[in-house]
Amino acid sequence: MGRLEITVNGIVRDATGTPPQTNLLTWLRSIGLTAAKEGCAEGECGACAVLIVRPDGARSRLDSVNSCLVTLGSLHGAEVVTVEGLGTPDRLHPTQAVLAAAGGSQCGYCTPGFVSSLAGEYYRADRTPGQHGCGNGVHLEALAGNLCRCTGYRPIKDAALAIESPPADDPWVERLAQPSSWPSPVSVSDAAGAVVRPASLAEAFDALDADGAAPLAGGTDLNVERNILGRTKATLVAVEALPELRCLEFTDDHIEIGAGLTLSEIERRLAGRVPLLDALWPQFASPLIRNAATLGGNLGTASPIGDSPPTLLALEASVVLIGRRGEREVPLADYFTGYRQTLREPGELIKSVRVPLPLAPLTAFHKIAKRRMDDISSVAVGYAVELSDGVVSRVRIGLGGVAATPIRALATEDALLGCAWTPETAAAAASVMKTEGTPISDARASAAYRSAMLEQSLLKFFASTREEVAR
């Protein structure tokens, strides 16, 4: 078994001997850092939130993540910060102080998670006064995914709006001005399983050859299965830091998005260049999840209710797969072959997602779920439409939650193509849309409801485009 070391609150800790597929939260609590709590074990409550120091160009950033969904063995050489490392009872950190002053803590169970997320926002390098409509530039969305069971959210919001800018001599300001690196290559194992972080793509393929091996990126889906269902893999191969999976490139005819980039990284680096993805991000779980989850992972799980496939299908994206025999590009519309099944062969990795240019000018992402935000889709729809002189000249519609796989709404696309963009056309196409897929009834929605939502979604999309078309 290899050596496993993780820096926590500035101290290098030896985690060697701990089962490497243990989640970070369990290990932190085992070494006495008990502020982070387990609330849901699936990334919905934020009680377990901690901060991880990550590269951000020539400097570093603090990303808040759900520690219950982080695999311990993937963190060799990483730097973790818990609320115990931010402040002490005698000397509170500014984020702790404002929460206390605003009455933002009652039972205290959720408070460390809020502090972690707020600290990430406190030290955000590009936070400027007036940004996001707030005098101190705080993006309140940064607190999403942290649930409070006692105080309600007003005093927590008040606290967030009361934080100031960190002073220049703040030790974390000085630390984040320095570069950092991704976790180091490692191979650790015990009787329950192994974690391998390869140093190269070739090493990744070697590790994936082992029986029962599976790729690991953010772990936000895989670790839910471990926590809730007790499902484990013989070997987890951590691939998100491989340089080949971390590209983001713009060419004349496409955008290449690396499968190992977190969703938060993609959002920052695209900087609004793909409006349909900008519509997706706020509805994809929470910042705690998006700071860890990757497009490669979301497509790799092949869930019919994953949020990214409907938008990527509407964008006519393709998946670039890479294996020992080289690369191959597969249209996303052909990638899914059955429930949780894809064209990806054993030993292959998703290298990137390729979005062709130019982009359609009229786009939208509709997510229908039991909760408005931070929930699993009952139905998800991505739209990309182009008009020429008021006539639909190009249309792509991606659907999730209405079949065993994400699908294109091909019949609806045919009903729209070549038709004038009018209420009559939208109504006729919406009647086709409600027949798309093979929806089922389950705990989230009935088949009839899903069909009805497809119809209403298209009518809503048409109504939302009227003003834009008029311009």
Image (cartoon, grey):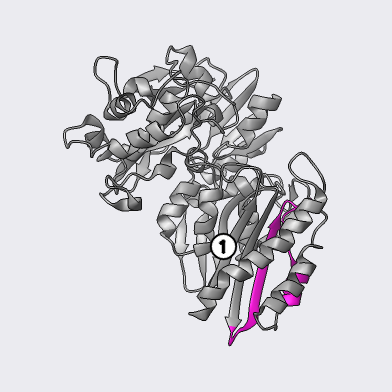
| Residue at numbered disc 1 | 354
> Mark 1 belongs to which amino acid?
Arg
Outermost residue, left side: 169
- Residue at horizontal 31%, vertical 52%? 131
> Residue 30 placed where, x, y %?
49, 13
- Residue at horizontal 76%, vertical 45%? 445
Left-right relation of 214 to 181: right
Count of number-bearing discs: 1
> Residue 441 placed where, x, y %?
82, 45
Crowd class of label 1 (few under 14; some 14 to 19; many from 20; radius 10 Å): many
Give 227 or 157, whichever is nearer the viewer: 157
- Residue at horizontal 65%, vertical 37%? 214
Outermost residue, bottom side: 389
Q: Which residues are magenta?
A: 388-416
Residue 279 in view (yes/no): yes
452 in magenta: no
> Residue 326 placed where, x, y %?
61, 56
Left-right relation of 21 to 344: left
Give 220 or 188, whichever is nearer the viewer: 220
From the viewer's perspective, is residue 327 above or below residue 54? below
From the viewer's perspective, is residue 125 above or below residue 52? below
